[in-house]
Image (spheres, rainbow, N blue to C red):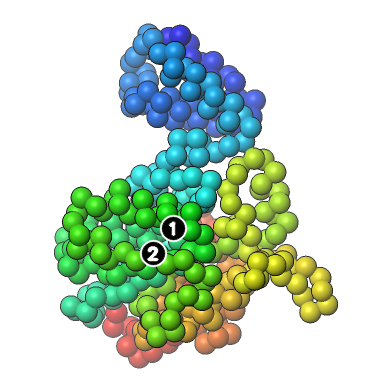
């Protein structure tokens, strides 16, 4: 079948189930055929090989069943970089880019203030590693940050399959830069900070933890999106049970993990350190209030759509203003 004919057919098939059938079609065709968007326009009469057409038909069926495009292709662009993704990890979202952007600003400011001392950064609940790795990649692209000054990054997650994806993404993005850069990344399987010694302190702690209320997760997963519940449900206790109020009623605010994460992050935060945490727009203010109740100062940053998204927290010191 010719490319233009197949393109029209796929778009029509996906229009019944996908909110973005044209975009989905272009992504699938580009991935399968190795074509750019320009190629898709200019090679209208290209005869698509039978094996490629069969793959595309199968991909359309999986997309129609609700499987995200990123899980079909195994790739997702985030902050301008390509990341490997599987159903073991969340698909990176554009709204999370504000966390990366703010983290880069904070780290550069700290590096300028503290000179030669290497900073330490922890990305808790790292998933695919997209946050920490995008931050590191962006720092290395700044001419003020030579490889020997790149901070040490700890990428931590409770899921070993997720950590495997993060390791693979680190190798894909940094292995060509040599062993010095690769040595800056450490991967730790841990239930929040449980497996990390309290003696270890971090200058910056980043996190996009599970923060979606339990019943909202149920709704999200009904459409077949296949993202891991473990990375979504914020109403799970450290022992893996549904969080409950004192009267036994199930909690449904998405804040249980955050309630545990903030005090643990505080215990592992170095003097003049900063915590940057993504939350839902519906619970950013509650997250900030929890942090303030523990002595943090906070600021909430908005995402690309103007929604409250990232909570920045720090313990007030006379030296912070010099960062």
**Contact check, label 2 and label 1, Cβ < 8 Å:** yes
Q: Nearer the viewer, residue 184 or 257?
A: 184
**In the rendered image, which quarter contains the C terminus?**
bottom left
Could you say which is closer to the camera, residue 98 or residue 135?
135
Left or right of 322? Residue 177 is: left
On screen, residue 17 above or below 241 = above
Query: Does 190 sit above or below residue 8?
Result: below
The residue sitting at 42% across, 67% down in the picture is: 188
Q: Earlier in the sequence, mark 2 or mark 1?
A: 1
Point out residue 289 in the picture as x, y percentages from the top left corner: 59, 78
Q: Residues within 10 Å of mark 2 (few under 14, many from 20)?
A: some
Q: Foreground residue, 320 or 225?
A: 225
Q: Residue at x 41, y 45 (%)?
A: 84
Residue 107 position by quadrant:
bottom left
Answer yes or no: is residue 186 visible. yes
The disc placed on residue 274 is none
From this viewpoint, is residue 97 visible? no
Q: Which mark is residue 187?
A: 2
Closer-to-camera residue (118/9): 118
Q: Which residue is mark 1?
A: 163
């Amino acid at each position: 079948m010719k490319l233009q004919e197949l393109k029209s057919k796929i778009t029509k098939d996906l229009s019944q189930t996908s909110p973005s059938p044209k975009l989905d079609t272009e992504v699938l065709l580009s991935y399968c055929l190795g074509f750019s968007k320009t190629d898709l326009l200019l090679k209208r009469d290209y005869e698509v090989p039978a094996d490629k057409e069969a793959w595309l038909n199968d991909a359309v069926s999986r997309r129609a069943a609700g499987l995200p495009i990123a899980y079909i292709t195994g790739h997702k662009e985030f902050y301008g970089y390509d990341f490997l993704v599987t159903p073991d990890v969340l698909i990176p979202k554009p709204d999370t880019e504000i966390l990366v952007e703010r983290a880069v600003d904070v780290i550069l400011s700290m590096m300028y203030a503290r000179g030669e001392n290497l900073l330490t950064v922890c990305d808790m609940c790292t998933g695919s590693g997209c946050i920490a790795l995008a931050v590191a990649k962006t720092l290395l692209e700044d001419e003020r940050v030579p490889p020997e000054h790149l901070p040490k990054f700890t990428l931590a997650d409770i899921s070993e399959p997720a950590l495997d994806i993060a390791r693979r993404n680190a190798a894909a993005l940094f292995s060509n830069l040599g062993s010095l850069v690769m040595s800056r990344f450490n991967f730790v399987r841990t239930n929040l900070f449980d497996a990390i010694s309290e003696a270890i302190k971090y200058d910056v702690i980043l996190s996009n933890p599970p923060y979606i209320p339990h019943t909202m997760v149920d709704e999200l997963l009904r459409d077949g999106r296949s993202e891991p519940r473990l990375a979504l449900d914020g109403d799970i206790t450290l022992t893996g049970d549904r969080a409950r109020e004192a009267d036994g009623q199930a909690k449904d605010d998405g804040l249980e993990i955050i309630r545990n994460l903030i005090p643990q992050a505080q215990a592992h935060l170095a003097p003049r350190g900063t915590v940057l945490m993504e939350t839902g727009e519906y619970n950013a203010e509650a997250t900030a209030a929890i942090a303030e109740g523990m002595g943090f100062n906070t600021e909430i940053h908005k995402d690309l759509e103007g929604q409250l998204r990232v909570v920045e927290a720090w313990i007030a010191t006379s030296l912070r203003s010099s960062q």
